[in-house]
Image (spheres, helix red, strand yellow):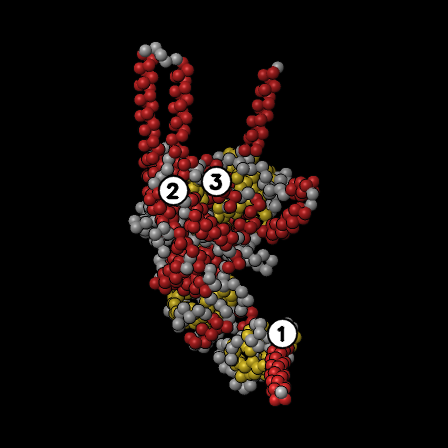
Amino acid sequence: MKKKKLKSIKIQRLFYLQNKYIFYCILLNIFLIISSTCCPASQLIHGKISDGVSELPVSGASIEIYKRGDKLGKAFSDIDGYFSVSFDLKANQKPQVLTLTIEHEKYAKLSSNIQMVSGKPDQKSYLFSLLPSELTTCRLIKGPSVTIGHFRSPISSDYSELSYRISDTLTYDLLTRLQQLHLNPLLQPTFLACDEANPRGANQAKNFAKVLNTDAFLFGNVKKATKGHDVRIFVIDKYDLFLIPISLYNKGIDLDDPASSQLDSKTHAAILTSIAVGYERNNNFSYCVDATTAAENILGELTPLLLKVRKRCQEKLDHNKLLIGGN
Amino acid sequence: MKSIIIKIITIIIINIFFLFSLSYAGKTLRMDDEFRRIYNREELDTIQSNLNRKTSLKLLKKRLLHIPHVKFRVAVFSYEDPWGTDIGNALATIMAREILLNSNVYSLGVLTYEGNLKSDKSFNLSYFDKVEKLTKDQEVTISIWGRIQPEGNSLVIDTNVQVSEYSLSNYFSWDLKLPKAMGGGALQAHLKPDRIKLQRFKFKKEYKSSLINSINELNLLRENPNKDSKVVAKIPIDQVYTVIKRENNWVYLKIENGKEGWIISKGYCSEVFQPLLEPARFAASLLEYSAYKKISNATENLTNEALALEEQIKALDALNSETQENIYRNSIKRALRWVGPNRWTGIDKWTKIDRGKGTPPGGAAFVNVKALAEIAIKLHEEYKIEYFAMVERMREELEYMRRQNDRGWLDRYDLSNMRRKTNRLEGAVFDKIVLDNEFIKKIVNELATASLNDPNNVDVLKNLSILYTILNDIGRTEIVNMLVEKAINDEL
């Protein structure tokens, strides 16, 4: 009888211990869940900052992280342009957006959004290219654009205003072509003169196009010729459409005449091709087709590249669904 | 007594008619002032929508047209002159006077705008878009503007013309009515392109001073109709001037400020500049079409866009011809000069204008013309078949009735009943026609293919919508309706 009683006490204790164990386990889990969601955890954002044109690292830039206007952390880039900002952020399963700002006296202020997923930044490391402050006025915030950079001239002469002349002429020549097709004014390109943009080579020219966020970047040089001047124009885009700048010759131009800024039809076509690709990248396929039509009207026919761009854009049009027995 | 009153009333009516219908007037405006006016007006519109009707009417009175008592209006803008050649206003004057003094349109007003069409900080629109905004509330039929570009020892003058939205819907739209059995809708076409470069004209810089002298003469009012007569006034800015009478190559003008005098209307331009007047004449021809449905041929010094416009108008006009042959000759054949495998390229044998190659001016507009013409011809064919069948039936009935009449059984009631029946049947023949689905599918595919090259052509898309509805293709009707909406929004 006594034995039986002892056995039942043992069983009861076992149950008691087992329940206690389960209870502590639950408590521990609750603590873990609460601590993971409520308590701040230390975070790091790494990255590298370089000059958008020369690609050289930028040291001493100030990097700050904000969440809804509240500063979370600050750091400076080192001699190789690297930085890492440490800050405390409440871990949250929901995605969060932080704002990262970069400031440097020689560059335009940059602001970028950082996505935080499960409390961690969505990239291991971020790369930022800064726009030299002398080029600040050459970059548009939105809308398609064409930027006309510096034209190098012989040492004895100065044609620094050539980019302004060209931008004026292009504005009329190309904008009217696009307006004939009734493009929405908000989506028409702006032609900007930027004599400060003076690339030293093909790679740098591409960097200019990218850092200035321009559909087509034009630059070139001027040479004295037996009759007038030979103006060599290079066109490059930010979309890697042209792997190296396209080179076009405009011969025998009298640059002493302030009105000499007419570009040949091939230059116009190259610019319109870049604008067409810009529309394509922004999913505006009908305007992309329109831009190729404008180029076709100027050239009299479509170049193989223009044809390729037009076909690509046409394939993405909903108009394809209208063909009976077609696509 | 009664007849005298009627005569007096008739004379008054005739006088009023002449006063209002045969008037020619002009006014020069400053573009900057116009902007302010437009913006103030837009503000007024916003306020107006929030006010009661009585106040709205008061405000509506302020919405006066610059030249209200005319039927047609033309706007001419100072030519863009970025290199300071100083002939921008002069060229606008020459175009404005040529249209006002030498066009055959009754009741015409010419507005001349002085200023710059390049976008600036105060107004973020340029060129064609700016012209449209400035003229929108003036019920202008067409606008003319251009640009001067020095090129070596020459000056290059571009002249552009644009047909306003107002006249596109009032004068330059066509439709083809479909039978009731096919839904009774109407396929449509509007003139396209509506913004064109009319001419690129080049002349030696040394002639510039002679051009300026000729044009200065166009601003001076003289006491008598001869060049040596005393100058009594100069046409001022912002004042309406009206044509009072004509005498040989001179016109008598009266300015709003009360001053009057003679101005030369012909022979003011030297031989070198005669081609420069051709855009003005072509623009006048577009005006004449608005008034009398008559269009002149494009001439050698104009662009292929002008030629396309002229041929498109003629092709669309022929759509409602009485015979299939006429539609084929004037609509389809003209459209095929611009589209299809046998598109005409190079120098045109009649006008000497380079027709170019590839996509024609107006994009899919000529494919649309061709589609409409093919449908019109098919409707004629079907009508003929139905009509002959009806005639045959009627003949049999008539024969039967004749036999009845021979026996003396037919009375007057039967005959009039027969006539009514004939008339009713004739009217119903067209509405009974149903075109073959395979034919419609062929047309639809041609239009859909063309829309791939001109995705925002609203005419083509709207016509496709009607044709898909006939084919009972609900899916494609929905897609095309969505594309119509997008195309309209994209233009805004």
Type of amino acid under label 3: Tyr
**Which residue matches tag 1?**
A67
**Residue at label 2?**
B372
- Mark 2 and mark 1 residues within 8 Å of each other at the beta carbon: no
Front residue of A224 and B157 = B157
Q: Amino acid at mark 1?
A: Lys
| Residue placed under numbered mark 3 in the picture | B171
Question: Of tags 3 and 1, which is closer to the observer?
Answer: 1
Q: Is residue B222 left or right of residue B428?
A: right
Which residue is located at x 65 percent, y 73 percent? A69
Question: Chain ID for label 3?
Answer: B
Say which of A14 and B451 sits in front: A14
How far, Cα to Cα, is label 2 from label 3? 18 Å
In terms of secondary structure, where does tag 3 sit?
A: loop
Query: How far across and how far down the image is residue B384, in percent?
Result: 33, 32
Give residue A174's position: percent from left, percent from top: 46, 59
Q: Which image quarter is the N terminus of chain B in?
A: top right
Q: Secondary structure at mark 1?
A: strand
